Amino acid sequence: MDLAGDELLARIRLPRRFAGWRHYYRKVGTRRAQAISKVCFAGVKSSGGVRIALGSVAPVPLLLNGDLAREISPIDDIRSTARYRLKVAQNLLEEFLGQS
């Protein structure tokens, strides 16, 4: 990101002109109130295709380009294991793609 040390991203606005788009977001964590997540998943479907972004499964949030298992690099840490994060990410992907 191109933010200076004293800058903070406060909001992201998306235009509402995307009729027919389906969106999906899930944050998997120990508690809802806790800001830290084990896996974050966001996806949109449109007539133009599918876009998927993931967080907490690589050093920085990322957009998937193809194979989830090859693109993410989860770690073992105090919050979760890499194996758990991979499985959750795969399950969320399956749930997202299974939605009509």
Image (cartoon, rainbow, N blue to C red):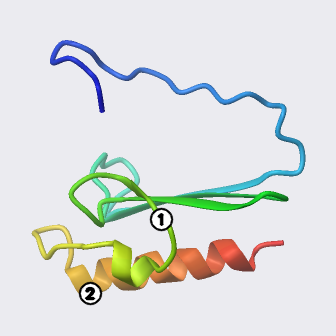
The residue sitting at the right extreme is 19
Quadrant assignment, res 45: bottom right
- Give the foreground label among 1 and 2: 1
Front-most of 95 and 30? 95
User: Looking at the image, which is closer to me, 1 or 83?
Assistant: 1
Looking at the image, residue 70 sits to the left or right of residue 63; the answer is left
Vertical comparison of 87 with 39: above or below: below
**What quarter of the picture does the C terminus occupy?**
bottom right
Residue 94 lies, in percent from the top left, at: 61, 82
- Looking at this view, name the residue that lies furthest to the top: 6
- The residue indicated by pointer 2 is 83
Specify few, some or many for label 2: CA neighbours under 10 Å numbering under 14, 14-19, or 20 or more.
Answer: few
Q: Are marks 1 and 2 in contact (CB under 8 Å)?
A: no
Residue 74 on image: x %, y %: 24, 73
Q: CA distance from mark 1 to mark 2?
A: 18 Å
Residue visible at 76% across and 73% down in the picture? 99
Residue 60 placement (x, y as % from top left): 27, 52
Report the side of 61 relative to 51 (left or right): left
Residue count near mark 1 (Cα–Cα under 10 Å), binned few <14, some 14–19, many ≥20: some
Give the labeled residue for mark 1.
64
Instruction: Report the number of discs.
Output: 2
Residue type for callout 1: Leu
